[in-house]
Image: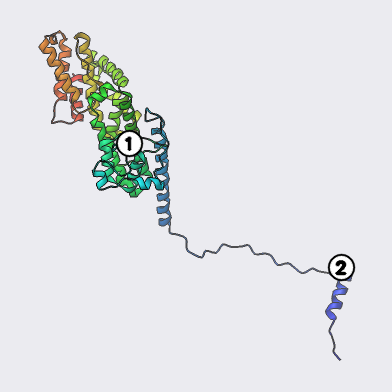
């Protein structure tokens, strides 16, 4: 006969009947979870390198966005802005210009019947690095290289495309910078809305290029930027500064005219540029200081004797103000009116003009010589 051991059942029943003697089983404590690293952490040098790379990219994005906002905060074209071109569409791809024979013939594929270009072609050329077409646009329709459509310009487009298109950005920046020196006296003398619009567009593009640091050596670029400001909006600044320096010149050495001119120029340049950018254009600042002294002397002279005015757009354009002043003095001498000027102003004019026409010394040296002749005399 099969025997069954039920002792454990009887023990359980008796335990429940006497609850005071019942002891529930102890629950095991749950162990806290712990993270297990399947791979080693990167080394500190790797983390530092990655952090610096991300910081540089963030700084670049910040500077680029800030430059776009400040440079394009005013309209760059006197005409109403057109709708943004659809240069990414398949249609624009079919109409895009070719970079070989079509560009050389002056009527790229997809251009207007008269051979002119459209904005989508310029943007497409930037994307494809079509230098031939961009140079043709520079020669025929330069305004397209600086025109903003839909908040974008060819230079900004090249910058946004990244390192692969940095060479195109440099090419465009160089073309825009050189255009400043090619602005004719007739254009500046008339200063019609189209010329003013072009200068403002050049200024905005150069500001973006400077902020981003397109060129490793930005001296010429920054000088062009300052020059285009003088061309487009410099009349008031130059006239007011000339009057200040003229007052200092009338006071003689006590007025420290050269030092006064230097302070005026430094203040203006510091307003337009950052500290590290100002340091790179010392020669431009020196030439501007010398020109301001000459303009102040000529202002005093024309208060006594009638003479032709010197155009403000000659300011800091090589030695144009010095040569123009030399011509005006020769005319005065031929007319016999030069002797009507006081001896002191004649001495200041002759000494300053002689120094400023020296070709074998730099701008800083000329300013030092002017300071010795006018401030320390």
Mark 2, secondary structure of its residue: helix
Mark 1, secondary structure of its residue: helix
The answer to whether residue 362 is seen in the rendering is yes
- Farthest residue toward the left? 334
Residue shown at 10%/12% (left/top)? 334
Using the image as rendered, state which of residue 106 and residue 253 is in the foreground: 106
Using the image as rendered, state which of residue 168 and residue 29 is in the foreground: 168
Residue shown at 26%/32% (left/top)? 180
Q: Quadrant of residue 176?
A: top left
- Farthest residue toward the bottom? 1
Q: Earlier in the sequence, mark 1 or mark 2?
A: 2
- Farthest residue toward the front? 113
Can you say which quadrant of the picture contains the C terminus? top left
Residue 274, image x and y in percent? 35, 34
The answer to whether residue 217 is seen in the rendering is no
Residue 223, image x and y in percent? 27, 32
Residue at image mark 2: 19
Residue 269, image x and y in percent? 31, 29
Q: Quadrant of residue 370?
A: top left
The 10 Å Cα crowd at callout 2, few under 14, some 14 to 19, many 20 or more, is few
Q: CA distance from mark 1 to mark 2?
A: 96 Å
| Relative to 332, residue 205 above or below | below
Can you say which quadrant of the picture contains the N terminus? bottom right
Residue 368, image x and y in percent? 20, 26
**Is 192 on the left or on the right of 150, as rendered?**
left
For residue 144, the mark is 1
Using the image as rendered, state which of residue 254 and residue 365 is in the foreground: 365
Q: Quadrant of residue 242?
A: top left
Residue shown at 13%/22% (left/top)? 354
């Amino acid at each position: 006969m099969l025997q069954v051991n039920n002792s454990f059942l009887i023990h359980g029943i008796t335990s429940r009947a006497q609850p005071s003697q019942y002891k529930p089983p102890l629950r095991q404590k749950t162990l806290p979870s712990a993270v297990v690293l399947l791979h080693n952490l990167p080394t500190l040098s790797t983390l530092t390198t990655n952090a610096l790379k991300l910081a540089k990219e963030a700084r670049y994005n910040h500077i680029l966005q800030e430059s776009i906002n400040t440079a394009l905060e005013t309209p760059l074209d006197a005409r109403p802005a057109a709708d943004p071109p659809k240069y990414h569409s398949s249609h624009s791809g079919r109409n895009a210009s070719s970079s070989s024979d079509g560009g050389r013939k002056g009527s790229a594929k997809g251009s207007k019947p008269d051979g002119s270009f459209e904005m989508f072609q310029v943007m497409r050329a930037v994307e494809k690095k079509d230098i031939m077409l961009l140079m043709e646009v520079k020669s025929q329709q330069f305004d397209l290289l600086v025109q903003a459509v839909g908040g974008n310009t060819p230079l900004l487009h090249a910058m946004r495309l990244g390192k692969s298109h940095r060479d195109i950005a440099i090419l465009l920046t160089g073309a825009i910078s050189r255009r400043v020196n090619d602005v004719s006296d007739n254009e500046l003398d008339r200063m019609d809305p189209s010329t003013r619009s072009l200068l403002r567009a050049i200024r905005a593009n150069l500001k973006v290029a400077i902020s981003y640091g397109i060129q490793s050596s930005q001296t010429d670029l920054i000088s062009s930027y300052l020059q285009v400001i003088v061309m487009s909006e410099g009349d008031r600044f130059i006239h007011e500064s000339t009057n200040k320096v003229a007052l200092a010149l009338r006071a003689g050495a006590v007025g420290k005219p050269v030092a006064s001119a230097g302070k005026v120029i430094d203040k203006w340049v510091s307003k337009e540029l950052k500290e590290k950018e100002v340091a790179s254009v010392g020669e431009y600042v020196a030439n501007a200081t010398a020109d301001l002294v000459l303009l102040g002397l000529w202002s005093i002279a024309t208060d006594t004797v009638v003479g032709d005015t010197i155009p403000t757009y000659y300011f800091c354009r090589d030695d144009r103000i010095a040569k123009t002043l030399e011509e005006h003095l020769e005319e005065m001498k031929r007319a016999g009116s030069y002797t009507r000027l006081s001896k002191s102003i004649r001495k200041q004019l002759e000494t300053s003009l002689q120094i400023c026409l020296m070709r074998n010394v730099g701008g800083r040296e000329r300013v030092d010589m002017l300071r010795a002749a006018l401030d320390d005399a």
